[in-house]
Amino acid sequence: MPVQTRCQWIQDPPCTKSGQVVCEGCSRKHCAQHHCSHRQELEAKLDELLRNNETVLDQAQAANPKDSALQQIDEYEAQMTAKIRESADNARQKVRRIIEDGKNDVKKELQEIRNGMLEKKQNDDYFENDLKAIENKMNDVQKNAARQQQIKVILQPIQQWDHLIQIEKPVSIRRGRKRFD
């Protein structure tokens, strides 16, 4: 006589009927009543997965990573432009300061030479060698003034503009494909 297996319904209360129908998915035997209940649970789970699928699809369609990526590029461009502008402004200030300091130095040196010449003239205390020394000092001041106008600007070029911004395509998570028949 064949051994009868009880219904393997896993919810309370346990079923005392014999299990006659085998579920191919979970391999449990159920009585006719619980087999129907088990199928209804599976159908409810499948319906939930279908709703989730629709939700994910809607989110994927609504999400626009393009806008986010373009916004990041725009923000980066604005930041880089601001940094370049700030760097250029700082460099201009340094040049102006160097020019102004140079003018002040020349003015101060020429004023000292002038005061010395006026003192020598007033005291009638000058000779050829004094005039030659004054002339040499004035030539030196003039050369320094000309050198101060030759400010050297060293620009640091960006070597690889095309690699300044890099774009990476997201990696998809793919599982083994199964056909659902």
Image (tube, grey):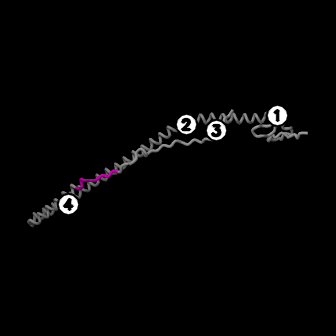
Q: Sequence order check: which comes first, mark 1 or mark 4?
A: 1
Identify the residue under disc 4.
Answer: 109
Q: Residue at position x 20%, y 60% from top?
A: 109
Left/right of residue 179 with respect to residue 130 in the rendered view: right
Disc number for residue 33 = 1
- Residue 100 coordinates in the image, percent (x, y): 26, 54
Q: Secondary structure at mark 2?
A: loop
Please report the bounds of the magenta region as a residue range: 147-155
Disc number for residue 177 = 3
Residue flagged by tag 2: what amino acid is it? Ala
Disc number for residue 140 = none
> Distance of mark 1 from mark 4, alpha carbons?
112 Å
Instruction: Characterize the local packing of mark 1: few (<14), some (14-19) or many (20 or more) Cα atoms within 10 angstroms.
Output: few
Residue flagged by tag 3: what amino acid is it? Arg
Disc number for residue 63 = 2
- Residue 88 coordinates in the image, percent (x, y): 34, 48
Q: Look at the numbered discs 2 and 1 and tell me whether their residues touch, using CB distance below 8 Å.
A: no
> Distance of mark 2 from mark 1, alpha carbons?
45 Å
> Distance of mark 3 from mark 2, alpha carbons?
25 Å
* Of marks 1 and 4, the one in the foreground: 1
